[in-house]
Amino acid sequence: MVNKLNIKAKICGGKIISKLVFRPISLAYFLLILFLTLLFIPWLILTGGVFVKLLHLPPLFTIFIFLFSLFGSYINIPIRKVSSSEPIITVREITFFGVKWYIPEFSITQRKTIVALNVGGALIPLFISIYLLIFVIPKLELNPLITYIKILIALIIVAIIVHAVATPIKGLGIATPAFLPPFITALISLLLYQFYIPSNPFIISYISGSLGTLIGADLMNL
């Protein structure tokens, strides 16, 4: 997922006051996630088997997927910075001879948005999708071209639907209903994978779901 970190710079009285707005990294939260990960190691082993059997990924590769997805979710790679000016009206309170006066003040805020690429949420799924497209599909699919066409159709549909429901939130980033992208992806994959020549529905689902969500929610809202 592409994250957006926002920097506000308030110009007031010749001084610039900057404030960085970001999602806080809680050590306790991270340790909790790590503990739950270790607690569910048997389930992760089973899931790793799913990656190996259904997506045809190397066993060692699946271990790195879990590790990089966990630790990479806290790593953001800055891509570019977008600046915009916006007016702010504040009210200053003063007391004069026991009487309170409220004086409105006008100032200009310089909002700087840092567009960043999350390692665990964007880069890892991107690399896995590229690996499936380049190495797995040509080697194992009965008709790679048909599989590519199915993936493209599913990706376009997922991107359009996700873009329609994604909501840019000022100061935070882009919000998307959590369960909608995987539900739409699974439904479309089930409808497409048997068409003409059967294809691997899990590969169609993973690639179209990962890339379709990234394109629809993030790239189309930049």
Image (cartoon, grey):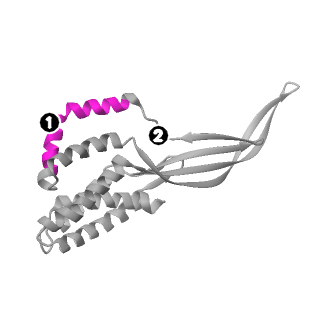
Q: Nearer the viewer, residue 192 or 165?
A: 192
Q: Is residue 47 magenta?
A: yes
Name the residue at the top extreme: 98
Going 14% across and 73% down the picture, which residue do you hit? 143
Going 12% across and 46% down the picture, which residue do you hit? 49
Name the residue at the right extreme: 97
Q: Is residue 218 visible?
A: yes
* Relative to 201, 20 lies left or right: right
Which secondary structure class fits the magenta region best?
helix
Locate residue 91, reporting x and y percent.
74, 39
Q: Is residue 190 visible?
A: no
**Above or below, comparing residue 102 to residue 113 in the picture:** above
Q: In which image quadrant can residue 136 be found?
A: bottom left
Q: Amino acid at mark 2?
A: Arg
Residue at the disc numbered 1:
42
Secondary structure of the residue carrying numbered label 1: helix
**Above or below, comparing residue 23 to residue 169 in the picture:** above
Locate residue 61, reporting x and y percent.
20, 48
Q: Is residue 213 magenta?
A: no
**Above or below, comparing residue 172 to residue 133 in the picture:** above
Secondary structure of the residue carrying numbered label 2: loop
The answer to which of marks 1 and 2 sits earlier in the sequence is 2
Residue at the disc numbered 2:
23
| Region rendered in magenta | 29-51
- How far, Cα to Cα, is label 1 from label 2? 31 Å
Q: Amino acid at mark 1?
A: Pro
